[in-house]
C-alpha cells in the first residue's frame, strides 16, 4: 500500500461534507483526473442517490490540486479499495493509462480500449466504459437525423475511442480520425478496423477532410477551461457541417460559438456527460437511474 496515496485520499474524503457513511445505505465514490474542479458529476451522483433514498459522497481526486504525479494512479486505486470506495469515474488524462492498473475489463471497455468507470467488487477492480453509450444517447436526442456518410473526429485518446465506437454503431459510413499525435490515431484506427474495416481511416489533411465531411466531433480537451481554443482553425467550418462536442465545461466552447455563428447544427457535451453518469451510477449502486432525472440534476448543479 502506498501510504502517501492513502493519506491523500483519506484527507480528500474527510474534507467532504457528506463523507460520514451510515450503514450499508451509503455510497462512497469519486472522480480521478486533472483539472476537474468544475465537474458536475459529483452533484449528479449525490442528487440521484438522494432521490432514491441513498446516502452518497462523491469526491474529486484532482491530481493537479493534490500535486500527484501520473505514477500515483495505481496507489490511488489501492487506497480507494482500502477506504471502502464502491468505485471511481476516470477522466482526462487517465482513461487509457488506467487499463494497466485493473484486474479485468468489461467487454465494452476491452473493445474500446478505454475506461471511464472502475468498480470494486469481491476484492477485484473491473473497468467499464459508459462514455460510448452516453455519447450515443446524447447524439440520438440532439442530432439523430443528421447525415453521417463521412464524419471527421478530432482526438483519438480515451474519450475519442469511446466516441468513435459510438459513431460507427450509430451508422456512420466513414470515419476519419485526426490526432496531434498521429501514432495514437493509427493505433485507434487499426483497432477499430477489426470490426469496421476500411470505413475507419486516419486523416492527415484535416482541412481537406472537413471540406468533404457531413459532420465533425471534437473529443480533444481543447476548448476546456484549462485548454482554451479550438481543435482546428474555425475557418474550416461551413454552414452545412454539423458539429459535436464532448466538453461540457464551459457549456459553449469556442468551437461551438464559431459553429453557432455560421448557423451549423450543434451538439454540446452535456448529453454524453449525463448519459455516462446514468450508466456509472447503476454500476456503483446497483440501482436504476434515468436520463431525465440525471439531466435535471445536471441543470440544477
Image (spheres, helix red, strand yellow):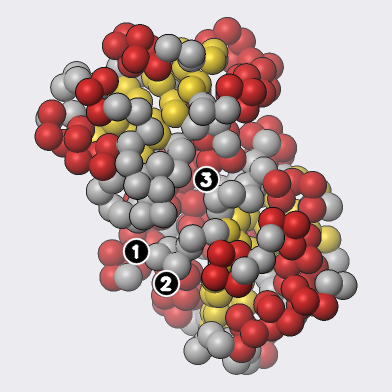
Picture disc at residue 298: 1
- Which is nearer the N-term, disc 1 or disc 2? 2
Tag 2: Cα neighbours inside 10 Å, few (<14), some, or many (≥20)?
Answer: many
Q: Is residue 265 above or below residue 26?
A: above
Q: Is residue 94 above or below residue 144?
A: below
Q: Is residue 250 above or below residue 179?
A: below
Q: Secondary structure at mark 2?
A: helix
| Image x and y of residue 135, in percent | 44, 41
Q: Nearer the viewer, residue 221 or 152?
A: 221
Q: Secondary structure at mark 1?
A: helix
Tag 1: Cα neighbours inside 10 Å, few (<14), some, or many (≥20)?
Answer: many
Q: Is residue 267 among what the camera can see?
A: no
The residues bearing labels 1 and 2 have C-alpha atoms spaced at a distance of 7 Å
Residue depicted at x 69% and y 83%: 10
Q: Nearer the viewer, residue 159 or 50?
A: 159
Picture disc at residue 206: none
Q: Secondary structure at mark 3?
A: helix
Q: Is residue 218 among what the camera can see?
A: yes
| Image x and y of residue 189, in percent | 61, 19
Amino acid at each position: 500500500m502506498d501510504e502517501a496515496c492513502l493519506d491523500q485520499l483519506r484527507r480528500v474524503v474527510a474534507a467532504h461534507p457528506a463523507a460520514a457513511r451510515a450503514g450499508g445505505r451509503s455510497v462512497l465514490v469519486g472522480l480521478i483526473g486533472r483539472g476537474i474542479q468544475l465537474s458536475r458529476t459529483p452533484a449528479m451522483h449525490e442528487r440521484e442517490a438522494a432521490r432514491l433514498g441513498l446516502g452518497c459522497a462523491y469526491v474529486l481526486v484532482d491530481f493537479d490540486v493534490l500535486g500527484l504525479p501520473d505514477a500515483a494512479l495505481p496507489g490511488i486505486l489501492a487506497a480507494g479499495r482500502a477506504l471502502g470506495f464502491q468505485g471511481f469515474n476516470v477522466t482526462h488524462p487517465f482513461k487509457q493509462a488506467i487499463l494497466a492498473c485493473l484486474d479485468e475489463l468489461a467487454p465494452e471497455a476491452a473493445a474500446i480500449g478505454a475506461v471511464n468507470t472502475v468498480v470494486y467488487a469481491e476484492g477485484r477492480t473491473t473497468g467499464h466504459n459508459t462514455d460510448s453509450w452516453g455519447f450515443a444517447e446524447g447524439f440520438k436526442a440532439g442530432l439523430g437525423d443528421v447525415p453521417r456518410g463521412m464524419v471527421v473526429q478530432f482526438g483519438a485518446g480515451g474519450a475519442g475511442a469511446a466516441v468513435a465506437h459510438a459513431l460507427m454503431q450509430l451508422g456512420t459510413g466513414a470515419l476519419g480520425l485526426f490526432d496531434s499525435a498521429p501514432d495514437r490515431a493509427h493505433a485507434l484506427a487499426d483497432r477499430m478496423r477489426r470490426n469496421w474495416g476500411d470505413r475507419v481511416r486516419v486523416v492527415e489533411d484535416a482541412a481537406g477532410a472537413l471540406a468533404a465531411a457531413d459532420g465533425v466531433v471534437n473529443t480533444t480537451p481543447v476548448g476546456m477551461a484549462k485548454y482554451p481554443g479550438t481543435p482546428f482553425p474555425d475557418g474550416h467550418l461551413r454552414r452545412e457541417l454539423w458539429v459535436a462536442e464532448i466538453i461540457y465545461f464551459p457549456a459553449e466552447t469556442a468551437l461551438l460559438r464559431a459553429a453557432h455563428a455560421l448557423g451549423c447544427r450543434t451538439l454540446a457535451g452535456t448529453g454524453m456527460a449525463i448519459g455516462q453518469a446514468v450508466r456509472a451510477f447503476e454500476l456503483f449502486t446497483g440501482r436504476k437511474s434515468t436520463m431525465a432525472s440525471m439531466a435535471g440534476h445536471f441543470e440544477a448543479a
